Amino acid sequence: MNREGPSNKKIEGFYMYRFIDYYHNEVVLSFDDHPFSTDPKHVWVVCRYQNKWLLTKHSDRGYEFPGGKVEENETALEAAIREVKEETGGIVDTIDYIGQYKVRGKEKMIVKNIYYATIKELITQEDYLETYGPILLEEIPHNVQKNRQFSFIMKDGVLLKSLERIKQRFLTNVSGT
Ligand code: GTP
């Protein structure tokens, strides 16, 4: 990937970015309305709390924005709100759909919704499940792709392009993000 990241192409009516991730899997990303599935089984939530990015520290993967799998009898939006609380203790104030991506893994294909959430409160949890709980960062480091503290899910064009979109849509007056 070059400095600007992958380029945007129109495929079957949707604008999409295509690239290869940390594990050499193919990823297709789009900021259009649910291009791959209306009922995705995975969610990822870029969170902001008190002018900082709110991440979690996953016990194996390291720092990442919270997310996970949609449970049965739950919508993707409900899963997003639940995962933020479970992994960071964050109570969602506002949440917006940003886009969707598809990863062609070695064994299966997954589709993930990307959300942007603002957090109104951080409540200490007794158990953060498979994570060590909240991490607040002023900035996502520029070398995130080479930084061993960060999870592989923060190391491809999904993060780069999602942050670009979020800054354009929601953070135009905020410096230092
Ligand atoms: P189980 O079904 O519980 O065993 O889950 P799993 O460990 O196989 O992982 P999951 O179903 O969440 O994802 C399957 C594969 O997709 C993973 O091994 C990753 O390679 C890939 N994957 C999952 N989430 C992401 C993501 O956010 N970004 C990228 N690039 N790849 C992902």
Image (cartoon, grey):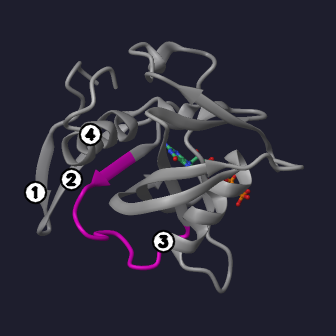
Q: Main secondary structure of the magenta part?
A: loop
Residue that mark 4 sits on: 171
Residue that mark 1 sits on: 10
Q: What type is the residue that disc 1 sits on? A: Lys
Residue at the image point whose x is 87% and y is 49% from the top: 127
Q: Which mark is residue 16?
A: 2
Q: CA distance from mark 3 to mark 4?
A: 27 Å
Is 174 or 56 nearer to us in this picture?
174
Residue that mark 3 sits on: 40
Compared to 20, does 75 lie above or below? below
- Quarter of the figure with the C terminus: top left
Q: What type is the residue that disc 4 sits on? A: Leu
SS of the residue under disc 1: strand
Is 62 or 177 nearer to us in this picture?
177
**Relative image position of residue 32 (x, y in whole percent):** 22, 63
Q: Answer whether labels 2 and 3 touch (C-beta < 8 Å).
A: no
Q: Is residue 11 left or right of residue 146?
A: left
Q: Which residues are magenta?
A: 27-41
Q: Is residue 89 left or right of residue 84?
A: right
Question: Which of pointers 2 and 3 lies earlier in the amino acid sequence?
Answer: 2
Compared to 156, does 99 lie above or below? below
Is 119 or 144 nearer to us in this picture?
119
SS of the residue under disc 4: loop
**Which quadrant holds residue 71?**
bottom right
- Quarter of the figure with the N terminus: top left
**Relative image position of residue 2 (x, y in whole percent):** 23, 20
Residue at the image point whose x is 43% and y is 13% from the top: 143
